[in-house]
Image: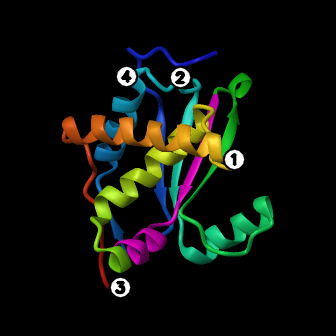
Amino acid sequence: MRENPSESKRAFVTSHCPQLDYSEQEILDLINLLDQQGAFDAPTGELSIAFVEKDRISQLHKQFMDDPTPTDVITFQGDIEDAVAGEICVCPEVAQDYTAANNKNFSEELTLYLIHGYLHLCGFDDLETEDRSEMRNAETQAMELVKQSNAIPTFTIRDV
């Protein structure tokens, strides 16, 4: 069963990163925009978005992908029968490191990670070269939509 593009997904946002500031409503608006776009065929059900620190994303990466290094985002498929679309775990610290090293915008980078996780739920993958190309095209399409709609959430990292 797939999402009706005219309906909004029930999404829940949690943060285990005390230094991350964001508007939950802006994140929900981002997910709703992607859902309403309808081009990605998102699964139905509740969506969980969790912002986690580097240590936690490294643990998840090791546990589920046998790689102990930190990563930007990990997506867990849900169970449609239980009305769960899935979970997107995102690491703001990885985005912060990347944007500092590459002179990029932190809010845009973290939004890209959310989009990437969302696209995994939609069936996109990035392990093989051909799949990675399709994922990058979908990311570009989604990011352009988000930018045109002025829907990039504002994220900031503050000193704790």
The colour scheme used to paint the residues is: rainbow
- Res 48 seen here: no
Residue 36: mark in rendering: 4
- Res 66 seen here: yes
Q: What's the distance in space between the residues labelled 1 and 4, CA to CA?
A: 28 Å
- Pick the residue in front: 57 or 46: 57
Q: Where is residue 98 shown, x and y percent of the image?
A: 42, 73
Mark positioned earlier in the residue sequence (2 or 4)? 4
Q: What stretch is highlighted in magenta?
A: 84-99
- Label 4 Cα crowd, 10 Å radius (few <14 / some 14-19 / many 20+): some
Instruction: Answer with the quarter of the image where residue 47 lies.
Output: top right
Give the residue number, with chain letter if any, for mark 1: 128
- Residue at image position (39%, 58%) is 110
Amino acid type at circle 3 is Val
- Residue at image position (62%, 68%) is 57
Give the residue number, with chain letter if any, for mark 2: 41
At mark 1, the secondary structure is loop
Give the residue number, with chain letter if any, for mark 3: 160
